[in-house]
Image (tube, rainbow, N blue to C red):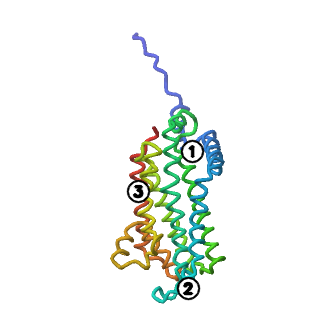
Amino acid sequence: MPAMSATPAPSPSASTRSPRPAPTQEAPPKARGASRAVLKTEARLFLREPGSLFWILVFPTLLLVILGLIPSFREPVPSMGGLRTIDLYVPVALLLASITTGIQVMPAVLTGYRERGILRRMSTTPVRPAALLGAQIALHGTAAAVSMALALTVGRVAFGVALPEQPVGYALALVLTLCSALALGCLLCALSATTKAANVAGSAVFFPMMFAAGVWAPVQSMPDTLQQIVQLLPFGAASQALAQASSGHWPGWSHLAVPAAWTLVLAEVARRRFRWE
């Protein structure tokens, strides 16, 4: 009689066992705690930088105060619909806060971290370098928002500048403008190998963007052809959006789309070109 093979029968429990659920993609608790620690540490370091605090928090409002002390700037201008020049410079100060933060201050900080090898060393710890990048964007964005609120308050209290009649549209335009400035800052950091190069590139972009925002002459007072050119830039379009919201109208979608489009394009290019080392 031939020998029968002793092939074990499959276990009923094995055949009916339900598949193990896929692990979630949430960050480990240690990594989340380390990211919070990075944010707190960067906040302390940020508050110890008087130069950065001056250019972000003080300079836009200080410029507004200096201009407001000029008597002719407080007189109505018939060609501008009875508005005063100082009325036009409050939104300019808000845009200047975004420009200074995103173009002048943040790129030098991030490039300095990469130049000193801090990002490379962080890659060996539970905290990824992206946590430091996110902390810097959050801190600089918050500081710019505080600067905007300060300039808006000083304009209202010191010079009687009316608050925007369409606050939601006004705030949306400011958020989009700030996002475009931070995205531009990330791109400058991605393209700059050293802190010195970041400062040079930032200065080269800083002054044209200040002109587009209306620092030297409000966009509303520019010739029509120049206005159309300036409105292709995020800060020129934002200036028009803020003017519309100030008068009680919802900002034109084209003026909101320009900074939004610049944000998406700049952020994508920065993501592709950014290097941690």
> Is 124 positioned to the left or the right of 261 in the image?
right
User: Counting other residues with Cα less than 10 Å from the Cα at mark 3, is it few (<14), some (14-19), or many (20 or more)?
Assistant: few
Q: Which element is circle 2 on?
A: loop
Q: CA distance from mark 1 to mark 3?
A: 41 Å
Q: Which element is circle 1 on?
A: loop
Question: Which quadrant holds residue 152?
Answer: bottom right
- Name the spot of residue 168 as percent of width and height, x first: 55, 74
Inspect the image, locate mark 1, and give the three-letter code of the amino acid beneath it.
Glu
Q: Are marks 2 and 1 in contact (CB under 8 Å)?
A: no
Name the residue beneath numbered marker 2: 75
- Name the spot of residue 71 as percent of width and height, x first: 58, 81
Inspect the image, locate mark 3, and give the three-letter code of the amino acid beneath it.
Ala
Q: CA distance from mark 3 to mark 2?
A: 34 Å
- Name the spot of residue 64 as percent of width and height, x first: 57, 71
Q: Nearer the viewer, residue 91 or 121?
A: 91
* Residue 204 disc label: 3
Q: Are marks 3 and 2 in contact (CB under 8 Å)?
A: no
